[in-house]
Image (tube, rainbow, N blue to C red):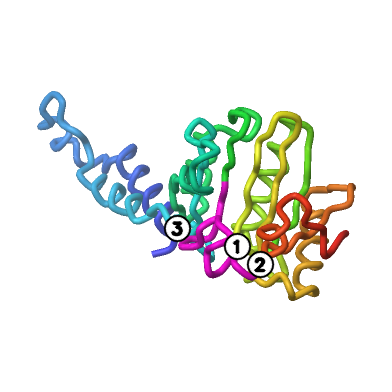
Amino acid sequence: MSVEENLKSSATTDEETKNPNPNSKEDDEELEEGEIVGEDDDASSSSKKAITYQPHPLEHSWTFWFDNPSAKSKQATWGSSLRSIYTFATVEEFWSIYNNIHHPSKLAVGADFHCFKYKIEPKWEDPICADGGKWTVTFPRGKSDICWLYTLLAMIGEQFEHGDEICGAVVNVRNKQDKIALWTKNAANEVAQVSIGKQWKEFLDYNDTIGFIFHEDAKKLDRAAKNRYTI
């Protein structure tokens, strides 16, 4: 039965309840105090229950990760303080999480907050990330909230033409600025990476130049690593 038919059935039942058969006066007189008129209300309740809640599944499951700055130390191995927070697979789950966590502007300096496809760890050593790289955009401290949300929505909503290349995104909160980086799988695929970079800038309405660094270069050269692609 369609939703429209359900609603019509419910309306008909309610009308019959409001206007009982005038020839049934004896039935009305026999009602005891507190008795409900119209047993057919059960049919109406059943039809309403047929309209069930349906979640909206995403194409991929995603996991939020948090690197707690208070747990970091110079002696600790990089990534040892990284923890998975929650994995979500529907639109409703995403919003229930997003609306109940701190946004970048509320995170402590030194925090790193990630959102990656399920079973991909936000580390260079992850097999899927190993041959990849990242695009990076920067903002004044505390001004990245909106673009972080737009980045998340573009990723989980599969808005990128080369969406299969996307591993995830991270926002880094630092003393003077916030950085959002978009990680991809195959850094050598220039066509795909440039396409992703251009689309990302459009989604964010970001006007400054952005650069793409290979993870391999970052591992070898650290901060001296240079952009391979720029837009």
Please tell me whether the stretch drawn in magenta is mainly helix, strand or loop: loop
Image point (32%, 45%), residue name: 16
| Residue 118 shows in this picture | yes
Give the residues drawn in magenta, as a range.
114-132
Dot 1: element: strand
Query: To which residue does mark 2 refer?
Result: 132
Query: To which residue does mark 3 refer?
Result: 3
N-terminal label among 2 and 1: 2
Residue 29, position as x, y percentages in the image: 14, 30
Identify the amino acid type marked 2: Gly
Image point (50%, 47%), residue name: 77
Image point (60%, 67%), residue name: 130
Measured along the vertical axis of the image, is residue 50 above or below residue 38?
below
Q: Is residue 94 magenta?
A: no
**Proximity of marks 2 and 1: CB atoms separated by less than 8 Å:** yes
Identify the amino acid type marked 3: Val
Residue 199, position as x, y percentages in the image: 79, 60
Distance, label 2 to label 1, CA atoms, is: 9 Å
| Relative depth, front residue between 106 and 5 | 106
Query: To which residue does mark 1 refer?
Result: 167
